[in-house]
Amino acid sequence: MTHLVLIGLPGAGKTTVGRQLARRLQVPFVDSDAVIEERLGCSIREFFEREGEEPFRDVEETVLDELTRGEPCVLSTGGGAVLRPANRQRLRARGRVFYLRSTPEELMRRLRHDRTRPLLQVADPLQRLRELHALRDPLYRETAHYVIETGRPSVATLVNMILMQLELGAEAARGATAG
Ligand SMILES: Nc1ncnc2c1ncn2[C@@H]1O[C@H](COP(=O)(O)OP(=O)(O)O)[C@@H](O)[C@H]1O
Ligand SMILES: O=C(O)C1=C[C@@H](OP(=O)(O)O)[C@@H](O)[C@H](O)C1
Ligand SMILES: [Mg+2]
């Protein structure tokens, strides 16, 4: 078992799907944002407002490095985990990475009433999600081993889709060894 890493924009379902996936596999679940908040002693939103984005990214890089060296787990990341090249390389090299992909419109529907996402506390959050999508979609794709479209499927179906991809990957590896 290696680290199973979930990446994607805010609202993609990284935390929700990750928790269920870990339960199904009976492995530990870690959300890097929760670890960061514990370390900061305050919410990410408060830290963003007080210190700005770069100090947050520094802590995020350290935490992601530590977690991907540690015990294998399902690791749900924050939406900006792919911004730094070092993070992209480490996540891809140390785990199997799943990009939970969605449209900005669907993400907006999910996060309409959510006030915990610092990057979306702007006058036009849908426009912000569109910008983030345009900027980051190539970075998520570069980092991921698998892309999972999350528009319609329920959380339980998404978990099954991920498990199926893992099983197919394991079969292909067995076939390569046998052949
Ligand atoms: N596949 C899905 N279908 C419908 N709602 C979802 C789905 N995945 C997540 N959600 C909902 O969207 C919101 C954001 O999910 P969350 O797991 O916090 O996303 P992330 O960690 O990627 O930012 C939550 O209210 C969650 O219940
Ligand atoms: O997209 C981003 O840059 C961020 C996403 C957040 O996590 P979620 O993707 O779980 O909202 C959190 O890490 C921080 O607010 C920054
Ligand atoms: Mg999350």
Image (spheres, helix red, strand yellow):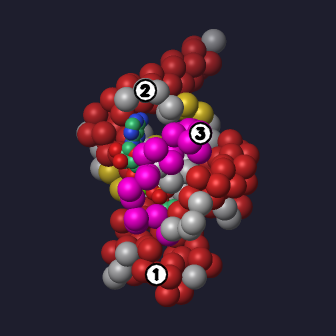
Q: Let me know if residue 95 appears in the view.
A: no
CA separation, marks 1 and 2? 34 Å
Q: Is mark 2 within 8 Å of ligand 1?
A: yes
Q: Which residue is mark 1?
A: 47
Q: Is residue 79 left or right of residue 30?
A: right
Q: Are marks 1 and 2 in contact (CB under 8 Å)?
A: no
Q: Which residue is mark 3?
A: 103
Which of 174/53 is in front? 53
Q: Nearer the viewer, mark 1 or mark 3?
A: 3
Which amino acid, by three-letter code, is at mark 2?
Answer: Pro
Task: Give the number of callouts.
Answer: 3
Which amino acid, by three-letter code, is at mark 3?
Answer: Thr
Furthest-front residue in this view? 123
CA separation, marks 2 and 3? 13 Å
Q: Count neighbours of disc 1 (C-alpha within 10 A) and say few if under 14, some if 14 to 19, many if 20 or more.
A: some
| Element under disc 1 | helix
> Is residue 71 positioned above or below 140 on the image?
below
Q: Which residues are magenta?
A: 94-118
